[in-house]
Image (cartoon, grey):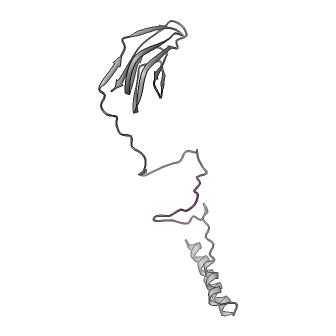
Amino acid sequence: MQRIRLIALTSVITALAVFALGGGTVTEALNKVQEVLVTNTADAPVPVTGAVAVAGTVSVDNLPATQQVSGTVNVGNFPVAGAPPAATKTFSIPVQSLIAGENYTFLGVFTTASLLTIVTDTPVEMTFNGPAPVLVATNYSTTVPLTQRIEVNSVNVACKATSGSCRFRFFVVGD
């Protein structure tokens, strides 16, 4: 801040000296006063307080580096995903078994899913088919809550075990 004051004071003194020596008009002297160079470096940062308006293109050049954040961060325009409505329908199958490398498609699921649950202790891939298919690959029981409902009309299961068989069951919860 001292540097800015010093530069401004020097500019005013220089402008007055030029004017006093007959080197120009009052307008020229004022123009000299307005030619102030402000530098903002790491060694001499310019403090900024209050709201700052930025026009034009803004570039953030240090991404994707991790940014340290402390204090409270307010992202006021971040969309909040509401919870899906309560489920009214569940499609499930009893425990099934497939031989290693085998696939099977379960038809007739026909639901709009908000939750997928897979029960297994062997490596399986399940594709919940519809307009926007969802693939879940797992070797343990898992539940996948969906922030947006998806239409499911069939489920393809692939046993990914290298030998033996896969035992599994699944639930599609929705409406």
Residue 133, above or below 62: above
Tally the numbered discs: 0
Q: Nearer the viewer, residue 56 or 74?
A: 56
Q: Is residue 4 left or right of residue 96?
A: right
Corner quadrant of residue 29: bottom right
For the stretch drawn in magenta, what is the main secondary structure?
loop
Q: Position of residue 74 (x, y in %)?
A: 42, 51
| Residue 121 in sight here | no
In the image, what residue occupies the spot 48% across and 26% down?
A: 133
Quadrant of the rendering where the C terminus is positioned:
top left
In the image, what residue occupies the spot 57% across and 76% down?
A: 5
Which stretch appears magenta?
Answer: 44-59
Q: Nearer the viewer, residue 3 or 161?
A: 161
Q: Position of residue 144 (x, y in %)?
A: 41, 27
Q: Is residue 50 magenta?
A: yes
In the image, what residue occupies the spot 38% across and 21% down?
A: 110
Q: Position of residue 19 (x, y in %)?
A: 65, 90
Q: Is residue 89 left or right of residue 169?
A: left
Q: Is residue 27 left or right of residue 110?
A: right
Q: Nearer the viewer, residue 7 or 87?
A: 87
In the image, what residue occupies the spot 57% across and 64% down?
A: 45
| Residue 154 in sight here | yes
